[in-house]
């Protein structure tokens, strides 16, 4: 395969690029290196990939670049780029989310339609569900996002479905459930929890700790991405949850991190933040049927691996 990976320098993107290169594929990576978090960390994420001659890096913004040129010679697309995070998507921040999550996706889909790619896999989010009515939540549940971020992810996902059903673009959308692991974004709860504890600081806990999440380890998500690019007989416009079906509360997460680090996590309790779903938990049955995928990494093992990575990174840095 010759794969275009958008958002290639991000947390999930960089891990997936490395996997595709190990599997012998050519990869064209595109990233705008936006300031959603420190761009230097994104460049650091690509250190290994840049040594591989099968990897090509383009610094481009999908909102205004020539999308057809990006797809020249490409047969598969993995669209991971977008504006992340719930809390910044309100008020004046919303326009950026519309541009980077909706407009960018539509432009890329139009190019994929013209180019006739073999597969267009795109990152969606469990945020499309909001506070779901049933758990584990199946893909047939009514989406009802509780944040503007979730609204834009649902819109981009529905664009993928529309281009699949109307124009035959072979799309599949992957609804990720709280992905974690080495290189996780610095603004995400588990990364902040580990970093602040190692630094002797206090972790800001929004709410009473009862919020529950499906936490899905990054190598499992990479497996899902590769399966989405290669699965045969995948219906156009498919949507699949990518979730570790077991869940944990924030209070349980705090205990697991403390155990992995060998020191307690100090907590500053803050009011519940607007736009945070009280619970997520996805059924992975459809992903098993269509992609042959299920999560394999249990939360304690994943946290231990992430904690070890954080310690090692500090040792090298210091």
Image (cartoon, rainbow, N blue to C red):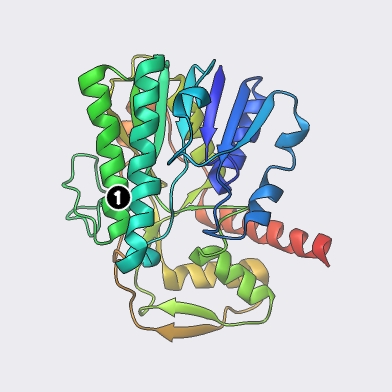
Instruction: Find residue 154 and report its image quarter.
Output: top left
Q: Is residue 285 above or below residue 74?
A: below
The crowding category of the residue bearing disc 1, from other C-alpha atoms within 10 Å (few below 14, some 14 to 19, many at least 20), is many
Instruction: Find residue 208 and report its image quarter.
Output: bottom left
Q: Is residue 295 above or below residue 171?
A: below
Image quarter where the C terminus lies is: bottom right
Q: Is residue 282 visible?
A: no
Pick whichever, 266 or 112, lies toward us.
112
Q: Secondary structure at mark 1?
A: helix
Q: Would residue 142 appear left or right of 187 to someone viewing this image?
A: left
Residue at the (63%, 57%) spot, across then down: 306
Q: Which residue has dot 1 on it?
A: 152
Q: Is residue 151 visible?
A: yes
Residue at the (68%, 48%) spot, across then down: 43
Q: Is residue 255 above or below residue 292?
A: below
Residue 191 image position (x, y, % from top left): 57, 64
């Amino acid at each position: 395969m010759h794969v275009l990976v958008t958002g290639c320098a991000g947390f999930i993107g960089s891990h997936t690029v490395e996997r595709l290169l190990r599997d012998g594929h050519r990869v064209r990576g595109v990233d705008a290196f936006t300031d959603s978090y420190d761009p230097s960390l994104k460049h650091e994420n690509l250190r290994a990939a840049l040594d591989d001659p099968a990897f090509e890096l383009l610094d481009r913004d999908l909102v205004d670049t020539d999308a057809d040129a990006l797809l020249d010679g490409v047969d598969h697309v993995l669209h991971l780029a977008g504006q992340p995070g719930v809390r910044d998507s309100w008020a004046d921040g919303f326009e950026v989310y519309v541009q980077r999550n909706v407009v960018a996706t539509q432009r890329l889909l139009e190019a994929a339609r013209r180019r006739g790619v073999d597969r267009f896999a795109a990152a969606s989010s469990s945020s499309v569900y909001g506070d779901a009515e049933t758990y584990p939540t199946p893909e047939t549940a009514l989406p009802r996002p509780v944040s503007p971020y979730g609204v834009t992810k649902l819109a981009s996902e529905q664009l993928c479905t529309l281009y699949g059903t109307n124009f035959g673009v072979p799309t599949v959308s992957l609804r990720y459930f709280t992905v974690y692991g080495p290189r996780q974004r610095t603004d995400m709860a588990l990364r902040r929890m580990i970093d602040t504890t190692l630094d002797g600081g206090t972790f800001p806990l929004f709410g009473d700790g009862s919020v529950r999440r499906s936490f899905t380890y990054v190598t499992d998500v990479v497996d899902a991405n590769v399966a989405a690019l290669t699965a045969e007989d995948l219906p156009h416009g498919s949507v699949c949850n990518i979730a570790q079906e077991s869940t944990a509360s924030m209070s349980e997460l705090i205990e697991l991190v403390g155990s992995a680090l060998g020191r307690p996590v100090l907590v500053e309790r803050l009011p519940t933040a607007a736009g945070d779903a009280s619970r997520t938990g996805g059924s992975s049955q459809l992903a098993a049927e269509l992609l042959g995928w299920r999560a394999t990494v249990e939360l304690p093992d994943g946290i231990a691996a992430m904690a070890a990575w954080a310690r090692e990174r500090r040792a090298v840095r210091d």
